Amino acid sequence: MMEKTTKRARAITAAVAVLVILAGGIVAFYKVPAFHALLHPHPAGDNAAKTAEQYTCGMHPFILSDKPGNCPICGMTLTKVESAPAPAAAVAVPSAPATKPSGGERKILFYRNPMNPKITSKTPAKDEMGMDFVPVYEDETRGSEGANLPEGYATVQVGTERIRLAGIQSAPATRETIRPPVRAAGVVVPDEKRVRRVQAKIDGWVEKLHSNFTGQLVTKGQPLLEIYSPELVATQREYLLARAGVERMKESPYEDARQMSSGLAQAARTRLKLFDVPESFIEELERTGKVRRTVTLNAPVSGYVTGKEVFEGTRVSPGMDLLTVTDLSSVWIEADLYEYEAQSVRIGQMATLETVADPGAKLKGRVSFIYPTFSPETRTLKVRFEFPNPGLRLKPQMYVSVALDLHGVTGVVIPDSALIETGLRQIVFVDAGDGSFEPREVKVGVRGDGKAQILSGVKAGENVAVRANFLLDSESKLRAALTKMTGGSSAPSQSQSPPQPKPQPQGQVDHTGHGGGR
């Protein structure tokens, strides 16, 4: 009996001891932070956050994490941030500093969805992908007082560290001379002033062709063809008879008779010349006094036979084209220029020509004519250039490239990469110092050599962003949208996100799931 009582007392004592230890453990779990952290570890607190390392995304600087990994948005590997304060928890948080430049606490207005800024919440929340909402601070939605910013844009506060991570670079606006290049593709065509057609002025037949194929080079005065014409034969006889009459009338005492005879001879000679009979042929006719059956027609100019309409034995009539001779020592280049290019072209301006057939050769020419109308199909203006053609380098219908040497324009010049084209306007971001970039709308003049003339919006000496300015553009638009949503002073009145758990005060831990909350 005593033995049973002793065993029961020992069991009760052991049970009481277990209950006491369990009660002490529960009290220590809630009262002793080290014991609580040992049994139930939480993300690092404020003290640990101060010494934790940070990693961020180069494309999305607002993504921060206390451990290596990949960006949840673009998948890029996170890079380490040197000497930067760690976030309060090992989750994505905004890259903005925790305090204002003046040292005061920053006020959070609301939280926004990182993928859709229109979805906001007054309390911390997560989106459908599990990403934490990004806090929006009061200073981020405050407009730039006194600044005349373009509509839909806001000044961007980046910070020196984010400038380095994002690869943002600036270049100064300088005052210099810029020459807008104008290049156009052209076609070689013959100079119309150097084209001659050999035509028949009488009825007859082609007895012999001295230039018997297209492309043959002929010189001025060279025989082209021999033609038989009964009318030419009769005119030769009339001229010989008139000359004989002049000889007979030399002894006549009548002055009128001598003058009439001389006039008839001169008229017959002139008639032969009007039929394009060469002077040498007439002189030989006068010397020999014999009528020739055929008459030789000579080349009127030096050039190439570019047209041949007859063969030996062909019957010809007045006005019929026989041969075409073209002088190609100088040619025309006809090129099409767009409307904005044609406004700078003037007659007499010098131009340089290059060809694919002879890349090393560069010929100098000038603008000889500007056509008065635009082409309705291509909306271009045709411009004519005149170039010398030594060695027949330029052949008709050859494609060439023409570069115009326009007069330089002096003004404020920035790199062309600084311009952000929106379709209706051009925007640049001016470096205001201390990591701040101010968007400005500019008016652009001429462009050339990777540079652009600025007519208004930027002054000489100011620095403009030339690299990664598309990041500034997106950030500026986002801040402008947030400012518009909040009116620049308060958080949005309605939240589009689902209700989220109430945030716990700083330094306290949510114990839901551990036996109740405090």
Image (tube, rainbow, N blue to C red):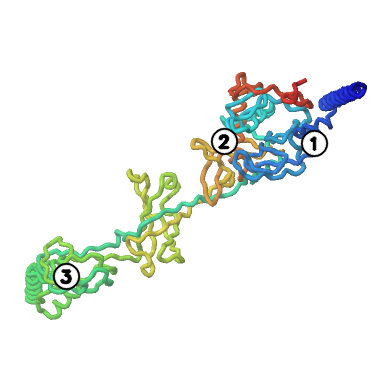
Say which residue label 1 marks: 48
What amino acid is at disc 3?
Answer: Val
User: Can you say which quadrant of the picture contains the C terminus?
Assistant: top right
Is residue 114 found left or right of 191 in the rendered image? Answer: right
Is residue 195 found left or right of 12 in the rendered image? Answer: left
Secondary structure state at the residue bearing disc 3: loop
What amino acid is at disc 2?
Answer: Glu
Q: Residues within 10 Å of mark 3 (few under 14, many from 20)?
A: some
Say which residue label 2 marks: 441
Is residue 11 found left or right of 331 in the rendered image? Answer: right
Residue 65 lies, in percent from the top left, at 70, 38
Q: Going from the N terminus, do you reach mark 2 or mark 1 first?
A: 1
Q: Residue at x 73, y 33 (%)?
A: 89
What amino acid is at disc 1?
Answer: Ala
Q: Residue at x 57, y 35 (%)?
A: 441
Q: Residues within 10 Å of mark 1 (few under 14, many from 20)?
A: some
- C-alpha separation, residue under disc 2 versus residue under disc 1: 46 Å
Q: Going from the N terminus, do you reach mark 3 or mark 2 first?
A: 3
Q: Is residue 347 above or below residue 434?
A: below
User: Can you say which quadrant of the picture contains the N terminus?
Assistant: top right
